[in-house]
Image (cartoon, grey):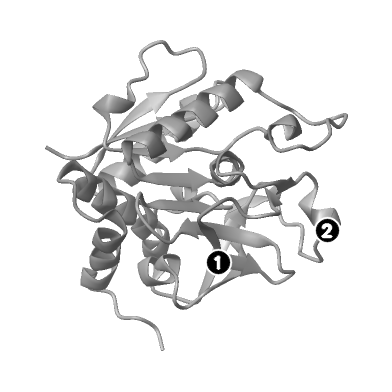
Amino acid sequence: MKPLIGVTVSRRSGWRIFPLMWLSVALAGGRATCWQAGDDDIDLDAVDGVVIGGGDDIAPTLYGGELRLGVRLDPERDALESGVLRGAFERGLPVLGICRGSQMLNVVLGGTLHQDAYRVYDSRHIRTILPRKRVSIGRDTLLAHSAKTECLYVNALHSQAVDRLGEGLRVAARDEGGMIQAIERLSDPFALGVQWHPEHLFYRRAHRRLFRSLVAAARAGRTQTAQVAAAEQEAAAAADVWPG
């Protein structure tokens, strides 16, 4: 049976985002189930992996920051996703964090965030679901092996970004201003966080491959074999040729 992936989404926008998540997971060879704050049937023991989706900003009180006016927060979702992530790590489940999900991954592992990242970095403030933002990927990262490129064009809908890294994480990509755009774990369980929204870019192979890496890790987890190694093998087995 195909791996089952639990996907967290916002109660406000989940109705339009989850179909894209479902499609992205399906194209990668998995199945997806939707989780939202308020659901009483979330069962981490029933899934093989987790996607933490995008949406509202994360409450700064979770990482030692100060509350600011004009920021849209969702405390119930914060509680849901921080609990899901902790439960996933306890069970050794692989995780893909998307935008807010990447930030939550960092926070749960003890890291911090820039609340207004564009005031810290000299990065182009692009807000679009189209792939118009250029990011540079570290060549020896899992993300580079999966995407098969050192330069990727992505979309951007965020205001927060990773500041201090959480335990066990490393930077996998930055934009032209130095802002962190992707993070990843070096060891099992597999965990990859990207600041952009690959579910909106399912028509591009490099972004579909991120979900393929997650599903490969989920398959490995079911058989209690190495997840990061399985994701690397999935990347290496892809028919696409590394550019340059």
* Residue 232 screen position, x and y as percent: 29, 66
User: In the depicted view, which residue is nearer to us: 139 or 199?
Assistant: 139
Check the image and report above or below for 94 versus 75.
Answer: below
Check the image and report above or below for 196 versus 123.
Answer: above
Please say if the residues under marks 1 and 2 sit with CB atoms less than 8 Å apart.
Answer: no
Residue for point 57% across, 23% down: 79
Q: Write down the residue under mark 2.
A: 120
Q: Could you tell me the amino acid type at mark 1?
A: Tyr
Q: Nearer the viewer, mark 1 or mark 2?
A: 2
Neighbours of disc 2 within 10 Å: few (<14), some (14-19), many (20+): some
Q: Is residue 188 left or right of residue 116?
A: left
Instruction: Report helix, strand or loop for mark 2.
Output: loop
Distance from label 1 to label 2 (Cα)?
Answer: 22 Å
* Quarter where residue 206 is shown: bottom left
Residue for point 79% across, 37% down: 65
User: In the depicted view, which residue is nearer to us: 143 or 105?
Assistant: 105
Q: Is residue 103 left or right of residue 31?
A: right
* Residue 212 screen position, x and y as percent: 30, 54
Q: Is residue 99 left or right of residue 205?
A: right
Check the image and report above or below for 11 versus 93.
Answer: above
The quarter in which the C terminus is drawn is bottom left
Residue for point 85% across, 30% down: 70
Q: Which label's residue is closer to the chain start, 1 or 2?
A: 2
Instruction: Report helix, strand or loop for mark 1.
Output: strand
Q: Identify the residue at the far left of this view.
A: 1
Q: Could you tell me the amino acid type at mark 2?
A: Val
* Residue 157 screen position, x and y as percent: 65, 47
* Residue 210 screen position, x and y as percent: 38, 56
- The label on residue 115 is none
The quarter in which the N terminus is drawn is top left
Q: Write down the residue under mark 1.
A: 153
